[in-house]
Amino acid sequence: MTQDHRFDDLHIETLAVRAAVERSQYGENSEALYLTSGYVQPTAEVAARRFAGDEEGYTYGRYGNPTVSSMEMRLAALEGTEAAMGTASGMSAILMMCMGLLKAGDHVVCSRSMFGSTIKLIGSDLAKFGVESSFVSQTDLKEWQAAVRPNTRLLFAETPTNPLTEVCDIQALADIAHNAGALFAVDNCFATPALQRPVAMGQTSSCIRAPNTWTAKAV
């Protein structure tokens, strides 16, 4: 869900409760729970455009839901990003990011103290599809820099890490990535935007994960 710039100047405490889709005609104080799987379309032509992605509008519950849109809009506002996308789990969010950014022959640099399932996904599962990876010390910037190759497309950090709670220098890693023409992603699951906003710290970080959600800022 794309960020609503009406909320740009509000404090984070206000964003946490006010950034959301517009109220319905009933004027509810909190956004409603939309439990439907499908949506009525005004015309067949509009439906065709919406299902093709040529026009905004809800079509099917798996593709979009006003309740989920409120959560995505609120998280994007809290993180200070342009958009957010909710997923069913944290690992599915990481897989979605990797599948969207990487292809066979690309290289990823990650911290070796990241969540174990993340290490397996990137180091083993993506390797089956030709994506190379290097794992480095969370806190040693020289190791990150030395691991960068001509085909490096992504630097991926989790900070603090799970379960070791190691932190990294977000700004310095963003600089290393961008100087190499790569993207920099931050798993922000532990801290959340209440305690850490990687986009503001790294200026042009590409992706930031909160639990089960990715938010994005263009680079």
Image (spheres, helix red, strand yellow):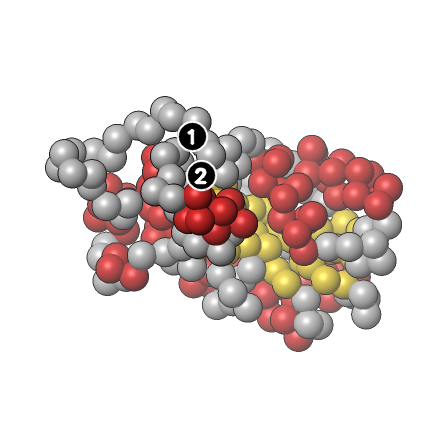
Depth check: give the residue in front, 206 or 54: 54
Q: Nearer the viewer, residue 70 or 167?
A: 70
List the single residue furthest toward the left: 27
- Amino acid residing under circle 1: Gly
Q: Position of residue 95 (x, y in %)?
A: 66, 41
Q: Which residue is mark 2?
A: 59
Residue 100 visible (yes or no):
yes
Looking at this view, is 117 or 146 the one in front? Answer: 117
Q: Are marks 1 and 2 in contact (CB under 8 Å)?
A: yes
Give the residue number, with chain letter if any, for mark 1.
Answer: 38
Report whether 126 appears left or right of 166. right
In the picture, the disc for residue 52 is none
Q: Would you say 161 lies left or right of 21 here?
A: right
Q: Nearer the viewer, residue 138 or 31?
A: 31
Snapshot quadrant of residue 143:
bottom right
Q: Which of the two labelled residues, at mark 1 and mark 2, occupies the earlier sequence position?
A: 1
Helix, strand or loop status at disc 2:
loop
Q: Where residue 25 sits: x, y (%)? A: 16, 38
